[in-house]
Every structure is written in structure tokens, then in C-alpha cells.
Amino acid sequence: MSKVALITGASRGIGKTISHYFANQGYSLILLSMNNENLEKAKTELSSRYSSCSIETVSVDFNDPVAVETTISSIISENDNIDVMVNSAGVLAAGNTELPLAKLTELVNVNLISTITACNLVAEKMKQQGYGEIYNLGSTAGLAPVPKIAAYSATKAAIVSYSQSLYHELLPFGVKVCCLCPSVVNTDMTNDGRIDNNLKIETQDLAKALDFIQSLSPGAAVNTLSIRCSVIDLE
């Protein structure tokens, strides 16, 4: 029985890089994203590099938590095992007090409600299996508030707290949870010209973080891992 990695936000950025990491490790992939065209491009790219890798793509809008619940439930029923879940789907929006309600709702739906909904469902399956790994994408903005992105920081702070609680809840069932908290990562989501892209964290750094965590001895666990961006810390 092959190992299965379920990755959200897999069509670009961090999620796409992490998909390559698990494909290289020999996992079968279930890739989720809203943009079906980008998903298929990611699948084609992965298939060309890892010809023996089984890849399933599922298009779902994380701004619609009910659709996410239905989709994840269906995936769980169709797979005997899910060994790894990476919750990488997320949106970034600048703004605090003047943020429009529609954008605030999207931030909370995508970064928080849909992520927790998907994670809860997979966590229950992993509890029944007696094993599994869950990696949630938080942010350093969730560890310490950042001016001008108050709402985004709030959603990531909630994910950090949720992940830390889930870590303690699932550990007795053989399931490990880690919240990866990078600072500014070089993706299209952060390509606003404020910081030189060469000075940002690379998406590959997140794959290296996963490799480090997975290389630890069975008795070791990491529930939160902060990956700093030095140019930001120098400001």
C-alpha cells in the first residue's frame, strides 16, 4: 500500500514545491486547489519528473467551507490511508480597519474555517489509522502581530493556536502535527516589489524543513517551526 500525501494549495508556490518533495519521496499525491488549469499544469510537471507517481487533482474553492467539507469527506471515503496532510491553501490581503467585509470573509474562510474543516476530517481518519503527519502553514505574522495586515495576522495566529492544540490532542494516537511558520516567502502572493525576491525565503526552504522534521528519530517531535526572513528582522 503506497503512502498518500494530501496537499491543499498545491497548484503554485509553497504547495507546489511541497508536492515535488513528496513525489520524490515516493508518495501518491492528492492535490487540491481552486484553479483547475494550474492544477493540471502542476500535474503535468510532476508526471514528467516522477513518471511512477500516482497523482489525483481536485478543484475546490476554499472560500466555500461547505464545498471543502464535501470534497475532503469524499477523498477520505475513497482512500484507505492518508499518511500526510499539508494545509498550504491560503490568501494574503493587506489592510486592517479598512478591510472590506468581502475580503475579510475570504481571509477567514480560506485561511481558517476551510483549513480547520479539512484538517479535522483528516485528523479523525488518522486517529483511526493510528498514524499520520499533519503540516499546517502558519506564518511568523501569526506568532507576532504585523502592522498593516491585522486580519491576515489574526487568521494565522488562530492556525498556530489550533495546530498546537491539535498536536497535543493527536499525539496519543500516533499522529504528529507541526505548524510551519515562515516569514516572507518568494511566491507570486508576495511579489509586490517591497523586498528583493533574492532576499526572501525560498519555497524550497519549506521542503527542507519537512525533510528535517521527517528525519528526526521516532521519539522527537516539532509542533511549531519558525523560519525567519533575515532582511525583515533587520528592519
Image: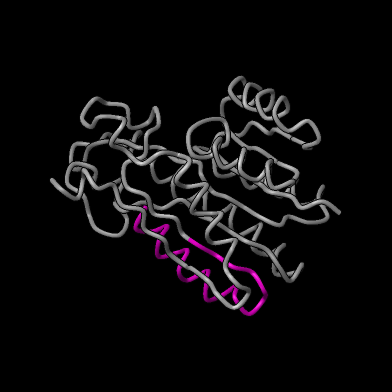
- Asked if 10 appears above or below 168 in the picture, the reply is above
Residue 21: name its quadrant.
Answer: top right
- Magenta span of residues: 155-178
Q: In the picture, which quadrant includes the C terminus?
A: top left
Using residue 115 as the reference point, say whether residue 48 is left or right of it.
Answer: right
To which quarter of the image does residue 119 belong?
Answer: bottom right
Residue 216 % position (x, y): 57, 68
Q: Where is residue 176? Give x, y as percent.
A: 59, 68
Vertical comparison of 173 with 213: above or below: below
Q: Is 166 located above or below residue 193 in the figure?
A: below
Horizontal placement of 64 versus 97: left or right?
A: right
Please state the horizontal and vertical placement of residue 207, each as a whole percent of the image. 52, 47
Query: What residue lies at 18% left-to-right and 41% top-to-bottom?
Result: 148
Asked whether 42 or 98 is in front, the reply is 42
Q: How many marks?
A: 0
Decide whether the magenta segment is chiefly helix, strand or loop: helix
Q: Is residue 163 magenta?
A: yes
Residue at 39%, 27% in the rendered image: 188
